[in-house]
Amino acid sequence: MKRLILSFLLMLGAVTWCMASTVTKADSAYSANDFKLAAELYQNSINEGGPSSTKYYNLGNAYYRMGQTGRAVINYERALNMDPSNERARDNLNFVNSQLRDKPADSSTFLGNLHRGVVSLFSPNTWSVIAICAFVVMLVLTGIYLMNTDVVLRKVGFFGGIVWLLITVYIIVVAANSSGYLKGKQEAVIIVPVAYLNSSPDADANNTDKVLPLHEGTKVLITDSLSTPGKEVSRWYEVKVNGTSTAWVNAAEVEKI
């Protein structure tokens, strides 16, 4: 049994060392301006050791330095999906978005911006701890109401419990948003220099069917998908741009976040 545990620990240490070595090599390649190799190594690290906000952030940087703004946007978005408090990823994403030919429309509201600001205050793990603490406080207030005969303490427990229940529910929602559990949107990013949206999912569409050109880095919302048989079976996504225009784009020209 001891040998089995020792073998497991040695194997775990070897895997950890290999993952750390891959990241170190990727960092060295990035510092040497070999961004293609750095991107490959960062991706290998994600595939082998699992994703993290930092890995996606570094991968986004490598793609941006290679001039692949679409893939840079994708990886910055993935970094923020994993950790909304990653300020470096947010700053770089805002910078890249400011350089895009198709500027994202600002459809945000005051309350929406306020909520996103709250979510980005802490990492998902920190919000989980805060949610647990808030739940414990709510239980304490409930206990004060149920186990005391003093009128003042019962009022404190009752009204404080109601208020804290609302606070706890919101904190749980924030924690869920932070960790990505409530992110059900199917978002994608254009990864080719120019993608033409079509009024129908047809690879042989003529110019009259092309409704809008979208440039690399533009984010779209996928609302439907289908495959069209022909000489070659191709997959198409029905997408919305800036929450308004709806059209079809070849799936090979976008990548899901």
Image (cartoon, rainbow, N blue to C red):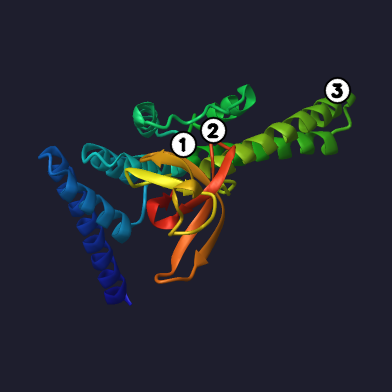
- Local packing at callout 3 (Cα closer than 10 Å; few below 14, some 14-19, many 20+) is few
Q: Quadrant of the N terminus?
A: bottom left
Amino acid type, callout 3: Val
Disc nearer the start of the sequence (2/3): 2
Q: Position of residue 128 (x, y in %)?
A: 55, 42
Please tell me how crowded label 2 is: few (under 14), some (14-19), or many (20+) other residues with Cα within 10 Å. many
Which residue does the numbered mark 1 point to in the structure image? 84
Q: Which residue is mark 3?
A: 152
Q: Residue at label 2?
A: 119
* Residue 187 is at least partly visible in this image: no
Q: Are marks 2 and 1 in contact (CB under 8 Å)?
A: yes
Residue visible at 34% across and 28% down in the picture: 99
Q: Is residue 35 above or below residue 150?
A: below
Q: Which amino acid, mark 2?
A: Val
What's the residue at 26%, 42% (across, down)? 63
Looking at marks 2 and 1 on the same chain, the residue that comes earlier in the sequence is marked by: 1
Please state the horizontal and vertical placement of residue 231, each as a whole percent of the image.
40, 71
Closest to the observer, 68 or 54:
68
- For the point 60% across and 42% down, the residue is 132
Q: Residue at x 32, y 43 (%)?
A: 193
Which label sits on residue 46? Answer: none
SS at mark 3?
helix
Nearest to the eye among marks 1 and 3: give it: 1
Horizontal arrangement in the rendering, residue 196 relative to residue 21 (left or right): right
* SS label for mark 1: loop
Quick one: 128 or 33, which is closer to the camera?
33
Q: Position of residue 5 (x, y in %)?
A: 31, 71
- Mark 3 or mark 1, which is nearer the start of the sequence? 1
